[in-house]
Every structure is written in C-alpha cells, then in structure tokens.
Amino acid sequence: MNATESKLSISDTATKSIEGGIRAIVRSNRPASAAGLCDDILAAGATSIAEIEKLMADLQTARDYLEAEGERVRRLTTRYAHLTQTASASVKIIAESLGKWRNPEPESISQVPCGEE
C-alpha cells in the first residue's frame, strides 16, 4: 500500500467515524446538541482542509521533481544532439580522406612519360 492509499484509508476512517456518530444520534431520536454537532462538522472540515493542504504540498513536490527531470532531459537531449552532429562531421571527414586514398589522382598518372615504362 503506498502513501496515497494509506491517506485515503485514514480519510475514509475519519469520515465513517463521523457518519457513524451522526447515525447514532438520528437512531436514538434524541435531539442533538447544536454545539456538539457543530464541533463534529468543524472537526470534519478541519480534517478535510488539512488533507487538502497536504495533498497540495505533495503535488507541488511532484511538480518540482518533474520540472527538474524535464530540465535534465533537455540538457541530455542537447548534449546528445551536439554529439551526433560532431560524430557525423567526423565521419564525413574520414570518408573524404579515405576516398582520396582509394582513387589515385589523375595528375600522378599523367606525369609518367609514355616511353619510359
């Protein structure tokens, strides 16, 4: 069970406890004291507000983490793009150099006199 599920189960427990108290008052057919009922409602509201604030803090933490990861991925992508451009340029230079070695230049062939072979 992760943290979110445990938070929900705690919230569900508090809600069920309050609902159980309200049901007990209704079933007993006794008039509920306004102060006691208001206190229960205020407690439930305070609990809900605290849970919402905690969830907001958790979401802010998750947002900060995702922004940091996004920035890290952008840096890595930029670095990778630069690396691939550099590698491509290097391969082009090497291919041009090897091409010159394979094909003898026409000047070197024409410099050999025809009668001296």
Image (tube, rainbow, N blue to C red):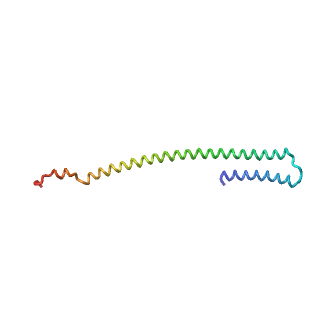
Left or right? Give the position of 114 relative to 74. Answer: left
Q: Residue 7 versus residue 49: which sits nearer the camera? A: 49
User: At 73% from the left edge and 51% from the top edge, which residue is drawn?
Assistant: 11
Left or right? Give the position of 24 relative to 87. Answer: right
Image quadrant where one finds the N terminus: bottom right
User: At 44% from the left edge and 48% from the top edge, which residue is drawn?
Assistant: 81
How far across and how far down the image is residue 17, in percent? 79, 52
User: At 36% from the left edge and 48% from the top edge, which residue is drawn?
Assistant: 89
Q: Pick out the residue farthest to the left.
A: 115
How far across and how far down the image is residue 20, in percent? 81, 53
How far across and how far down the image is residue 62, in percent? 61, 47
How far across and how far down the image is residue 85, in percent? 40, 48
Left or right? Give the position of 52 relative to 39. Answer: left
Q: Residue 106 versus residue 10: which sits nearer the camera? A: 106
Image quadrant where one finds the C terminus: bottom left
Tell me how many marks there are: 0
Q: Pick out the residue farthest to the right.
A: 30
